Amino acid sequence: MPSADEIKQRIEAAIPGAMAEVEDYTGGGDHFRATVVAAAFAGRSRIEQHKLVYDVFGSEIGGPIHALSLKTEAAQAQADATSGAINV
Amino acid sequence: MSESESNPIREAIAEAISEHETILFMKGTPEAPACGFSARTVAILQSLQAPFAAVDILPDPRIRQELSAVSGWPTIPQLFHEGELIGGCDIVTEMYESGELADALGVEAAPVEEIEAESTLAGSNGFTSIENRLS
């Protein structure tokens, strides 16, 4: 049964430059919520960003990991926010 | 993969996606969702008054397996519009809160309300049953 910390480390190891915050929101080791910020997400759609994270776990999603709720953000977007063209 | 030549479940899924402008693959039904993520997604679609067809993936584990093979998406629910995967519960929620979902679905934007996963809203839309086509 993976821990939140293990999920975090695996995401950060697999996606270049990723920073992940992971919470085991039921405490049962099978329902996780993750916020992932990565430069690798820049220029990718939300679907593609989430797929990159899901791909880290393959068939474990739906298996030992019952739920992995995601929020992703391209690291680039934070730098862009100062340019004036802000998408909120 | 030996079944790739003739795979009735996969074909039924692809057909359902192409036949319905908006279609949600979920656990349970819009009237009785069997998972909080499916419930939340249904509640969002209903609050936008977006018409959608729904497929319950629970009756046969092969539906989920084949759906994920078709979409490349591992989790349930999965929302499709005009043949394209929009996303699962997280993306649908994010798009709802930003107002993008109404645009993507071509419906009037409604004021954003807090959607409770436990919401049980009355009324439903077309219900598509894939398993029934396989008998």
Image (tube, rainbow, N blue to C red):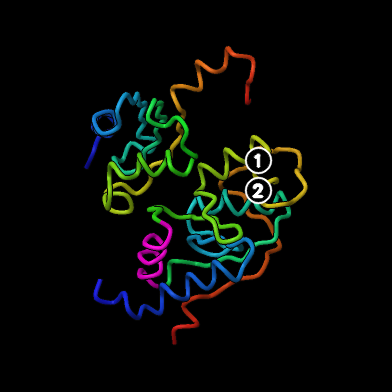
- Displayed quadrant of residue A2: top left
Q: Amino acid at mark 2?
A: Ala
- Whether residue B114 sits left or right of residue A81 in the image: it is right
Q: Is residue B116 magenta?
A: no
Label annotation for residue B100: 1
The residue depicted at 38 percent of the width and 67 percent of the height is B66
Q: Which residue is under mark 2?
A: B104
> In this orientation, which residue lies closer to the viewer: A62 or B13?
B13
Q: Marks 1 and 2: same chain? A: yes
Q: Residues within 10 Å of mark 1 (few under 14, many from 20)?
A: some
Answer yes or no: do the residues labelled 1 and 2 have beta carbons within 8 Å? yes
Q: Residues within 10 Å of mark 2 (few under 14, many from 20)?
A: few
- Displayed quadrant of residue A29: top left
Q: Across the whole image, how many numbered discs are drawn on residues?
A: 2
Q: What secondary structure predominates along the stretch shown in magenta?
A: helix
| Quadrant location of the N terminus of chain B in the rendered image | bottom left
- Vertical relation: A59 (above or below) B129: above
Residue B78: percent from the left, percent from the top? 50, 55
Farthest residue toward the top? A82
The residue depicted at 27 percent of the width and 53 percent of the height is A59
Pointer 1 chain: B
Label annotation for residue A70: none
Pointer 2 chain: B
For the record, the magenta segment spans B60-71
Q: Amino acid at mark 1?
A: Glu
Determine the CA span between mark 1 and mark 2. 6 Å
The residue depicted at 35 percent of the width and 39 percent of the height is A53
